[in-house]
Image: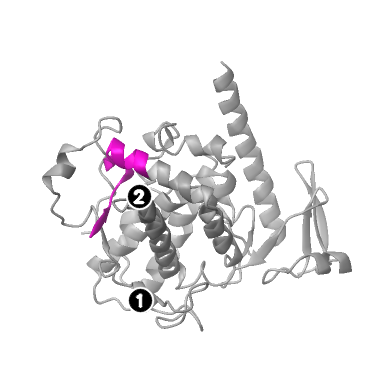
Amino acid sequence: MEPEHQEYKGHRIELRAPTADTLRAREAEPGEEFELLIDEVPIRYGQLPDGSYALREYAYDWSDNPMDLARKFIDYQDRANEIRRKAESRRED
Amino acid sequence: MGVRKNYRNLTNVERDRLVQALYQLKATDLVDQFAEIHAMHFFHNIHRSSHFLPWHREMLLRFERALQEQHPDITIPYWDSTVDRRPSNPLWNDSFLGQFDSAWDLRRALGSGPLSTSRQVRINQGRDNYDSFWRELENPIHNRPHVWVGGVMAGAASPGDPVFYLHHGWIDMLWARWQLAHPEAPFEASGPGVGLDDPLMEWPDRTPADVLDHHALGYTYDIEEITYDIEEITDRPAEFGTPPATSAPAA
């Protein structure tokens, strides 16, 4: 794995080497060598026994690539927010 | 012996009893403690390993015993997500699990992903060895409902949503049913440290060997041949209506 960044649906995804402050602040999960950020917000992740990665906040959709996982998470958040928005407007009607 | 049953077969009394016990366990911080235990071990062999099924069986058993301290007749019901596939299903009624969404700030988004089908479950039930069985049962069959519910249920601390226990009750039922249909299939370790006699994370005095026989743990499922007593039959619920057929067992 190498540090990298990309734009996806208007979001910036970044995989970067952790700073000394970050290393002090948290205990890394297995496989969490790099810091994953979406729009500068750290996203915790880890590696499962078979080598695939999962996010702590979105833990049941796995991938062998944390960047791919970040894209899946963005897609999920879009879907979930749309569902919540529709449910909210139904309640208001 | 306690009978774990489809949530649709709960009487109103049983449903309300479970809801009240869940609130009690939340108030004593036990719901959050179980969620923390699950999150802490998420990447440490409780998923994607041969300990996936035994670890969650042990966890459910411990949570069920905590519920039974609130009322001794409580058993964890199950949600068959190949049958109950809609946000309009009674599982999500405000009288049942629907109320917890706002009460516990679960941020659910029902329908956030696909669910598996009864055909996929039937095929999985036909696998003739433990290794191929648990891998497919975990992903996609087990994973999808976590994403479908969304919010807390989609994260590593998913036991913070009480539907976790009904979902894993179903997964445990599918394992029990597969075990009954394949009594000769041995437990197979997926790697070092996750064998039949290796300790389970968090509960090192327990191993998969301790939980293989769910009857020995004191419970059975309503899909097994059981005799209901007359009191249970006359206390049938009206609100949830006739339960739909659950996924058919493998021939």
Is B181 situated left or right of A11 in this image? Answer: left
N-term mark: 1 or 2: 2
Report crowding for label 2: few under 14, some 14 to 19, many 20 or more residues within 10 A (C-alpha).
Answer: many
Is B153 situated left or right of B1 in this image? Answer: right
Looking at the image, what colour scheme do you see?
Answer: one colour
Q: Please tell me whether residue B216 is drawn above or below residue A79 in the rendered image.
A: below
**Circles 1, 2 touching at the beta carbon (< 8 Å):** no
Q: CA distance from mark 1 to mark 2?
A: 22 Å
Q: Residue furthest right?
A: A20
Residue A11 percent coordinates (x, y): 78, 44
Q: Residue at x 20, y 59 (%)?
A: B251
Q: In this figure, which residue is indicated by the disc labeled 1? A: B210
Q: Residue at x 61, y 71 (%)?
A: A51
- The type of residue carrying mark 1 is Asp
Residue A69 percent coordinates (x, y): 66, 56
- The type of residue carrying mark 2 is Tyr
Q: In this figure, which residue is indicated by the disc labeled 2? A: B78
- Using the rendered image of the protein, determine whether residue B109 is visible from the camera's viewpoint: no
Residue closest to the eye, B26 or A44: B26
Label 2 is found on which chain of the structure? B
Residue closest to the eye, A50 or A9: A50
| Residue B19 within the segment the image draws in magenta | no
Residue A52 percent coordinates (x, y): 61, 66
Report crowding for label 1: few under 14, some 14 to 19, many 20 or more residues within 10 A (C-alpha).
Answer: some
Q: Secondary structure at mark 2?
A: loop
Task: Point out which mark residue B228 bears.
Answer: none
Where does the magenta region start and end?
B1-17
The N terminus of chain B - image quarter = bottom left
Q: Residue at x 48, y 59 (%)?
A: B139
